[in-house]
Amino acid sequence: MFSFILRRILLMIPTLIAISVVTFIVIQLPPGDFLTALTAERAQQNETLDSSLVLALRERYGLDQPWYTQYWLWISGILFRGDFGQSFEWNLPVSSLIWDRLGLTLIVSVTTLVFVWLVSFPVGIYSAVRQHSPGDMIATFLAFLGLAIPNFLMALVLMYFASRFFGQSVGGLFSPEYANAGWSLGRVWDLITHLWLPVLVLGSSGAAALIRIMRANLLDELHKPYVEIARARGVSEARLIFKYPVRVALNPFISTVGWVLPALISGEVITAIVLSLPTAGPLLLNALFSQDMYLAGGLILLLSVLTLVGTLLSDILLAVFDPRIRYT
Amino acid sequence: MQSIPMHADFSQTARPAHDPLVEIEGLKVRFFTDDGVVEALEDVSLTVPRGKTLCIVGESGSGKSITGRALLNQVPSPGKVVGGSIRYFREPDAAPVEITTLDPRGRDMRAIRGGEIGLISQEPMAALSPVHTIGNQMREAIQLHLKLGRKAADAHAVEMLAKVGIPRPAERLDRYSFEFSGGMRQRICIALALACSPRLLIADEPTTALDVTTQANIIDLLLDLQSELGVSVMFITHDLGVVAEIADEIAVMYLGRIVEQGDSVSIFKDPKHPYTRALLRSIPTFASTRGGRLETIRGMVPSPFARPTGCTFNPRCEEAIAGVCNRVVPWPVNVGPGRTVRCHLHADRAEIDRALESQS
Amino acid sequence: MTDTAQAPIVAPRSGPGSAGPWLLTWRRFKKHRLALVSGVVVLMIYFVALFAEIIAPFSTETYSANYTYAPPQLVRMFGTDAEGSTHLFYVNDYTVKIDPISLSRAFETDPNKVIPVGFFVRGEPYKLWNLFDWDVHLFGPQEKGHPFYLFGADRLGRDVFSRTVHGARVSMSIGLVGVTISLLLGIFLGGISGYYGGWIDESVQRLVEFLKSIPTIPLWMGLAAAIPPSLDPLMVYFWITVILSLLGWTDIARVVRGRFLSLRTEDFVVAARLDGCRQQRIIWRHMVPSFMSHIIASVTLAIPGMILAETALSFLGIGLRPPVVSWGVLLKEAQNILAVSSAPWLFLPGLAVVIAVLTLNFLGDGLRDAVDPYAR
């Protein structure tokens, strides 16, 4: 088991390197850089940037170096000093901007993951065991609907109804009085009361997908010979279903963490923008708009690392649950 | 469907002289599929003699497996038992249990499954849970039916595994099924099915998925266990070679009906039904392979939705009587002590004429 | 009865055994009522997208300052106008009240004012597919210039219905084009991966795993933000589809690889190889046709993902931009919650997205079940 985990962690290293390179290329892609954007912006306001100042800035950030040198400067700063570079727009170190927001992104995503499991597991089992029953039909229909409604649209519609029928704005993760306060019990409670909307919005499509997966897998397993033989052994029906087919159908369910988590973090980015959550999404969008490359790069990199860690956890969990994987 | 004159009381004539363990009478099973109703079993009557081996022989789709499942009250959906009775005589001369009326999910039925009737299936690869250890499954079976603690159950499991020839059984309890070969898995399945000393073992094509040498080993094992434990065996197969080795009694099935039954020796010596004869001719032997072609039965098993009228075998039968065999369903005819055959060739001509008349 | 001729041998079987694979698939598919209905709806949506100029009563840019945020009108039947003539279909005109304080307009439909609606009416001229000049619209107000807002109007007084119809062309085609690119990539990479195996397979698999492990939307956002804003709308459209398919081919590649792996050892492929067929020929003549149906099913299931992605990117303002009209661009109008609370009909393009995605999903599910009833 230990060697299995070690192997998986070692396998992550090349992936991480690849991700950092791709991230860097992506943030380098837009023509020009932050300084040309800044010059253009100033020019629009009829100001000119002193060309010697531009040159100085260019040198300071290494913007005149070839891309691989820039990449090395960037990645070595992150690896050896935890320095993600400077945000041009905020004029602050990137690391001072992102950790809070990434933390909240993680909280929202993981809460949603738990919500998705809690909903889809029983519903999926019910749907499969009572195939074609009215309950199954309703669950199936809702699942398809959940898959078809884009997250941001559901967020908008829910906000519309909230503002129309409750007369309140439901965006954000905190009430104004806690928005910039330090962590306290009150703030945690405030977060919990605000969390339901993003969790509902984000979880809908994930839960829908997992209900479909659980149902399909369980339907497959329900008629396998080992179930029939166990029944012929005199095992009672409820115990039979939970001990054997549900247990086996659980494995693909666990392995879906691997792709549900990236999808959740992806979806969180958009949902956060609509619901104006103080998470990574809106910050990333702004950074991309203003070509704030180190901020955007740091965010994309860390979001990717988050999903990689999630995938690793799901692999380990799967190995714990499925002997067939552990032994090969 | 035409009415069939029941001139020969099937259950009376078919019953062997010694005491029965299970008596099936007039069993009907239908499958209610989206494409129509399939008559999977039609008027099946047979007896499993206590302590002996009954072989049910037939091609795929003949209903032999369904017969086995019906005994466990475990006909797979969308199948349903729609008529007939299955009487299970726990002790000789005691009042029988009527299995068809038990709740398939109820406590009584579950006590019989595994506890009194064991099942081994044709797919040892898929018959064991892929994510539970052998010990886990054996312990479950043992503790369900025998009042044993965990330690005692484990000891019993080890004993059973040793009995079916698993080397170093104590170590193997913590292993998973995918760590065993096919033959080993089938041995484990047999140990599982026999763990609670059932009175009847239903072996549903237990050797089909195995290679020939392993087949022989499994058959020998079953024979040994039977003489050691005195368990009755219902052996379901399409392989007449195996039947010759182990059967005391034989029932030949075709398209949901028993076409011929009786004791093994006389059926092999003197088969009465054209289908049985054709089956026996199609066994490859050293004598017949020299120079000649292996005989086959012409045609194919008809679709269950397009069942031939009259005798279901008549379109493929070499000796079918036109105007009779394709019109009247044959009834069981007594052709010797404990032997019946469902064939017009052996029926009384006058009765056939009466049946034809009552039809038109 | 005296005839002692042999009983007839089993009659030739009609039924499942005699049908070809495509016919069999079609038969199984027909049983799937929901998928069948969805298929019809999908065809209708593509039909609308194809003939958007004719079906939409107005162009995407026709605006009217008098009708900003006008609510939707209901089509009614049998109305009598001021001159006393009766019309089969009509809508009611608006009366406008201007709030003296906020200066905002409040619209009400006036049951007394009848605007007759006709089919194949002459309206604004347009160029169908940029080729043919015409001015006939499938339906619209019988007299030019009358307000006709089935889905209401947006902040410039443009007809949301017409814009949704035009948006269908971009949104639905981006799904098709993106999937086509994905398909080519997926078949190529999945094919060589499954056919050759070995290190090629290994590296393609690593690539797939890598692409699947990165969160798509941040990456899409990064790539989409790299498209210069000054670029021609058509080029933006092209690059967006390329970006979407760059990450979208992995699922198709997985399916293709799986089929290749299982087909590689099938007798007919081995036979073709032993007969000395060239590899290209083995792949395209023998292997691809045998899993085409699987591909069609997974492609159908991939389209909704593309549509949703385009919608999301355009909604964020980093995908397609006006003057291109797609469902995502239209929904960007609904981003402002204040505007939406007074004009909820701006959500209606979202309904189009949901219907398109839902029906494509049902269709794809039905197709998959039909081509492979045993693999779930």
Image: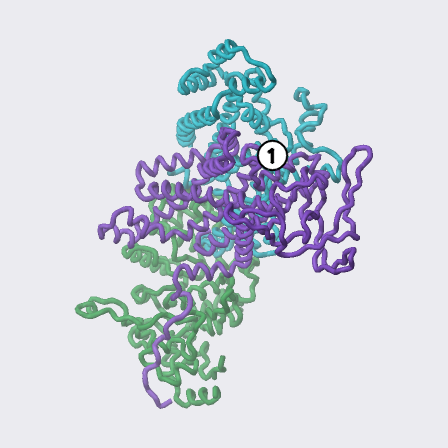
Q: Residue furthest right?
A: C100
**Horizontal arrangement in the rendering, residue C108 relative to residue B129 (left or right):** right
Above-or-below relation of A153 to B181: above
Front residue of C223 and B291: C223
Residue found 33% across the figure and 46% down from its top = B167
Q: Which color scheme is applied?
A: by chain
Asked which secondary structure carries label 1, the reply is helix
Q: Residue visible at 38% across and 64% down?
A: B236
Can you see residue A285? yes
Q: Give the image location of residue A30, x and y in percent.
A: 48, 26
Which quarter of the picture shows residue B12?
Answer: bottom left
> In the figure, B211 relative to C58: above or below?
below
Which residue is labeled 1 in the image? Answer: A271
Rendered position, C250 above or below A98: below
In the shown orientation, is residue B259 left or right of residue C139?
left
What's under tag 1, amino acid-wise? Thr
Chain under numbered label 1: A
* The color chain B is rendered in: green
Quadrant occupied by the N terminus of chain C: bottom left
Identify the colour of chain A in the image.
cyan
Report which colour depicts chain C.
Answer: purple
- The image shows residue C282 at horizontal and vertical percentages of 29, 49
Residue C324: percent from left, percent from top: 56, 38
Residue A48 in the image: above or below residue C167: above
Residue drawn at x 36%, y 80% as measured from the top left: B336
Neighbour tally class for label 1: few under 14, some 14-19, many 20 plus, Cα within 10 Å: many
